[in-house]
Image (cartoon, helix red, strand yellow):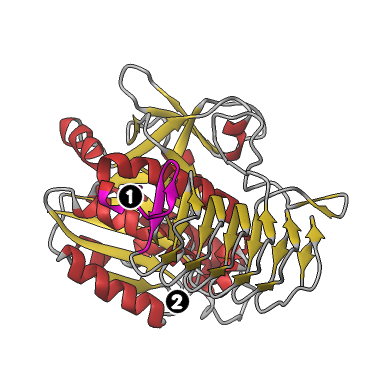
Amino acid sequence: MLKAVILIGGPQKGTRFRPLSFEVPKPLFPVAGVPMIQHHIEACAQVPGMQEILLIGFYQPDEPLTRFLEATQQEFNLPVRYLQEFAPLGTGGGLYHFRDQILAGGPEAFFVLNADVCSDFPLSAMLAAHRYQPHPFLLLGTTANRTQSLNYGCIVENPQTHEVLHYVEKPSTFVSDIINCGIYLFSPEALKPLRDVFQRNQQDGQLCLPLGEDSSGLWRGAGTIRLEQDVFSALAGQGQIYVHLTDGIWSQIKSAGSALYASRLYLGQYQLTHPERLAKHYQGGPRIRGNVYIHPTAKVAPSAVLGPNVSIGEGVTVGEGVRLRESIVLHGATLQEHTCVLHSIVGWGSTVGRWARVEGTPNDPNPNDPRAHMDSESLFKDGKLLPAITILGCRVRIPAEVLILNSIVLPHKELSRSFTNQIIL
């Protein structure tokens, strides 16, 4: 018996995803046509012996999340539950807090996946490696170049045994070209070190409390556990943590720009996993170039040219002569005749007028590209917005024959002129 835990974070963890996270929780943002965490759930559901999937985070269980959980359970015929943290508990605190629910039924092991990663999720290969040589912690790792490795957790392994000898989260100097993918397989014994961290935090908190002070607020500090710094760094080299290397697709999804890059990776993966999701060129239909997803309810004019890397959401209208490339168009948006949308995300219910042009600059957080602009870097330099993809928030109206370049437009704005390299409030 196996279980899976997906760590979905909470509202204040999606700030780099704004303004898109104003309308929907970041884990439900559509990437390659489906909610971000549906890719995780699909991968978990395909593992033989998977009995339950748990989502842990501190979002309020609102209508979109509840509706998604209900639909997911029906589609995969598998229990999918949301466990809400009372406060942000870090990447490991939620695992310890909900340890009874995770261990209920006596699972052999459980996967732990961060919601903000894109991957082909080689879970079956990780399970085979774990069963061949069981250990409390198995981390999925991939390679990065020396420059980009500094943006991730770095792993030094024994090349013969794959034991993790040293682990450093976002080092200041080069440590290793093997980085942490944020995808793990833990045995039940892995919760014991989390208990030790919790007890140590509790003791440290008591030592810090002034005499006579009420300790009722202690739980929040004691319950916060960072897997990377508190557990992996501390236990490296003690024969408890091992790494499984993958050469498959992987990236983080921290910002809107990285969501567009992840969409490209997933659309390419659909060639193998979900060819039915990719649009096909047919007589009288739009011209398709490369990998394109079109929701069945979208209306696309036959003279439109789409792709590569285009995702068109539910109820979208694409007019005659429209050119779409490297973009995501969200639910209910309208692209009027002869608009051009490149390297952009068009928000829910937004309208782009005739002959308008919405264009951004590619922002691919590829860990093997030394020139890539990473999500950990600032959006600004010398008080100016750096070139990046263009984002139109919810219900934005772009008039005809207007250029929007490398800009972020906040929701419900009706523009009257062109903008370049600006955040439009």
Can I make out residue 251 in this image?
yes
Residues packed near mark 1 inside 10 Å, few (<14), some (14 to 19) or many (20 plus):
few
Can I make out residue 196 in this image?
no
**Residue type marked 1:** Tyr
337 inside magenta stretch:
no
Please say if 127 is above or below 296. above
Position of residue 333 in the picture relative to residue 137 (left or right):
right
* Magenta part, dominant SS: loop
Specify the quadrant that holds the C terminus: bottom right
> Is 78 in front, or is 139?
78
Please say if 168 is above or below 422. above
Find disc 1 in the rendering and name its residue.
282
Residue 380 position in % (x across, y down): 79, 52
Instruction: Give the magenta range.
Output: 276-295
The number of numbered discs placed on residues in the rendered structure image is 2
Residues packed near mark 2 inside 10 Å, few (<14), some (14 to 19) or many (20 plus):
few
State the CA–CA distance, disc 2 to disc 1: 52 Å
Find disc 2 in the rendering and name its residue.
86
